[in-house]
Amino acid sequence: MSGRIQRLPSAHPTVALLARAAAILLALLTAGVILAANGADPLKLVAQVVKSTFGSRFGLEDVGLLVTPLILTGLSVAVGLRIGAWNIGAEGQFYAGAFAATGVALFVPAPDFVLLPLAFVAGGLGGMAWILVPTLARAYADVSELITTLLLNFVAVLLVYYVSTGPWLDPDGHALATTARLPCELPEFWGAVHWGFPLAVLLTVLVAAGLSFTRWGYEVRVSGSNPQAARYAGMPFRRHLILVMLLSGAIAGIAGMFEVVGTVHRLQGGISNNFGYLGIMVAVLARGSALGVLAGAALMGIILNSGIILQTQGLNVSTVLAITGLILFFTAIGDELSHYRFVRNETASV
Amino acid sequence: MIDLRNLSRRGFLNLGVAAGAGLMMPGGLIRPALAAAKPLAPVAEKDAVIAFGHTGPVTDEGWTWSHDQGMKAVQQAFPKLKTIFVESIPYSADASRTFRQFVSEGANMVFATSNYGDFLYDVAKRSPNVAFFECDGRHPMDNLGTYYVAHWYPTYVTGIAAGLMSKTGKLGYVASFPVPSVYSGTNAFLMGARSVNPNATLQAIAINSWFDPQAATQAGTALLDNGCDLLFGIMDEAGYLQVAEKRGAKAVMWNTDIRRYGPKGYISSIVVDFKKFYVEQVRQRLAGTWVPSTPILAMGAGVDRDAWGETVPEEVRKQADAARDKILGGWSPFTGEIKDSKGAVRVAAGKTMTEEELYNWNWSIEGVKGL
């Protein structure tokens, strides 16, 4: 039997799903073998992870809190990818959004029902402001947004460290290197999980619908896959690029707002927890699809939460990181492989 | 154990060895939250779970390693109990997740070996039957105590050695964040140096981390490039000592004896030892007598200077150790007049700062730059 291997432009969804499941299983198996070789009992560890994550309300709440910012930073990156822009700066926009929301919450004297929407808008605008320069530089001077968005991350972190240990430092001194506790917080949705979670899901669905069912979404997708064709067809490529990049920044900024107003309640240097960078992985796992972000963020949240559980079981932080990396590594290979199929040569060669 | 809010400074120093005194001391300064605290029920040793949450890796040969030694001492004293720990916990909501996981795994006592603030309090509030202890904390609760070390005394002692050994009188400091433990470190160090060289100054660089060998190395290099010839800091590892060694400068370190990373540059270290403290607290928890307290371990009882480095001259050792003896005898170097970096008098002439003021020091003295 003869045949050839053919690469498809897009993988069949079922094949992609199977490849992903196989990849995760394979990664866990590899990790299990390594752990067993080091004297740990992998089955006991898995049981503990499953029990702690899904067997208790606390575990599920923890995952919910973890997934909320991951959905939004993942969505931020995924939206950018739709028009071919790599927003590596979700981390910085997250900080900028948290910073702006904190400023509003700390200094605007207003009741909660005014303050919370105001902080939400401020968070979005903060993220947008942080990506504004890279956006204009890309749109008008063709400067790679990959570099500019990345570099601005470091500026944002330092800005937040500066205000939280300087001018906005908690005056009562109970907490070190943070601002005062914010006077308002997002109401609870389910246990410790605040309303940021359903809002993040809603926002994702809205963006996905906008991209799939509107003329704007169609033009954005065409512009992303072939800018020249889009221009030739008379689509305003530059306008779409600017709008989509600003939207991407705003979404990451809202993630920062949710984290500071919903989860942490104080602005401080470590607040981002690398959610901006993890968002890149979520978007890659989601294969750039807006709805896929929900699944990608859930997977990432469960992996990260399992990491904490594994550490309390005596695994050190490097081992946990290695397992996380292994899962993503196998997933990436699986994704690529799912684009190929074996085609049997039907006709005899002449 | 010593409680800073109950004791005069003199009593505090003399009680350094009287372990177990704790909150039994009469005094009016106990916070209401602590005064009302009832002891938690006893736990059988074989059922007990003691958890440690660390800011850095236990292999750092510094701060976290020292606390890990404390955990090992607990294991040795109570071999039947179970200990769990998580290292390198970020200062983010991940910290809450970690502490919550400790509780859900049945921890009876949780030590946070760094200041995690609300991330810890949120969990402590929801777990009233678990004993919590926060190192460098400032917010005791019914089931949460705080503990720290009076590092400013040995720091003052090493500052004298630094003042005598620095040729330029320009001291460098690798800081983490502008927080009280850093202010008390920079201030005590420069006050020691100025007691022998009134023109000494101190330049600090904050790197926003307690454990970041690369950033600490860069900061150390920048400080030496700017004319400093002696480095101090509050890092959990040996990065800037290696820089000093390479450049022929001197360094005072923290946590442990790490002279092998720079034997010529090593002056001394602010060494810490939490073993006794941890064993005693766990003993109380098991016995059902534990109530939250707010001890600060005294010089000679949890914190001290390390043995002097090989290049420290005899005369320098003598002069610095004379001050150490004086402090152990009850004298405090932190007596006015002390001016802040803007020149305003913050401690009046003749007035001595209290332990609580030293613990919460949040301003720089004259001569400190960069915080």
Image (cartoon, grey):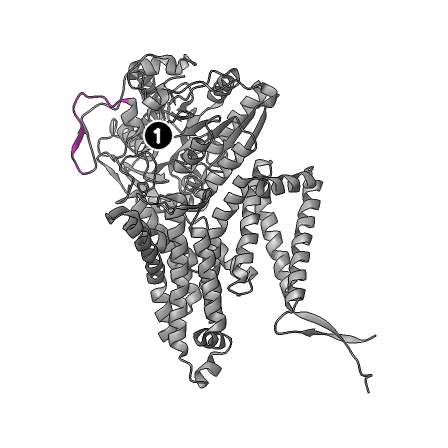
Q: Quadrant of residue A46?
A: top right
Chain bearing tag 1 is: B
* Front-lying residue, A195 or A236: A195
Residue placed under numbered mark 1 in the picture: B138
Estimate the x, y position of residue A293 in percent, counting from the top left.
Answer: 52, 60
Compared with A274, B10 (above or below) is above
**Quadrant in which the C terminus of chain A appears:** bottom right
Residue sitting at x 16%, y 23% = B349
Q: Tell whether position A297 is magenta.
A: no
- Tag 1 secondary structure: loop
Estimate the x, y position of residue B348 in percent, counting from the top left.
Answer: 16, 25
Q: Tell whether position B347 is magenta.
A: yes
Compared with A266, A27 (above or below) is below
Going by the image, does B43 lie left or right of A115? right
Residue type, mark 1 in image = Arg
Q: Is residue A318 in view from this perspective?
A: no
Going by the image, does A39 lie left or right of A238? right
Q: Residue furthest bottom?
A: A350
Q: Is residue B364 in view from this perspective?
A: yes
Tell me the crowding category of disc 1: few under 14, some 14 to 19, or many 20 or more residues within 10 angstroms, Cα based: some
Secondary structure character of the magenta stretch overall? loop
* Front-lying residue, A293 or B98: A293
**Magenta residues, as a range?**
B342-354
Estimate the x, y position of residue B364 in percent, counting from the top left.
Answer: 25, 35
The tally of labels here is 1
Residue sitting at x 66%, y 49% = A28
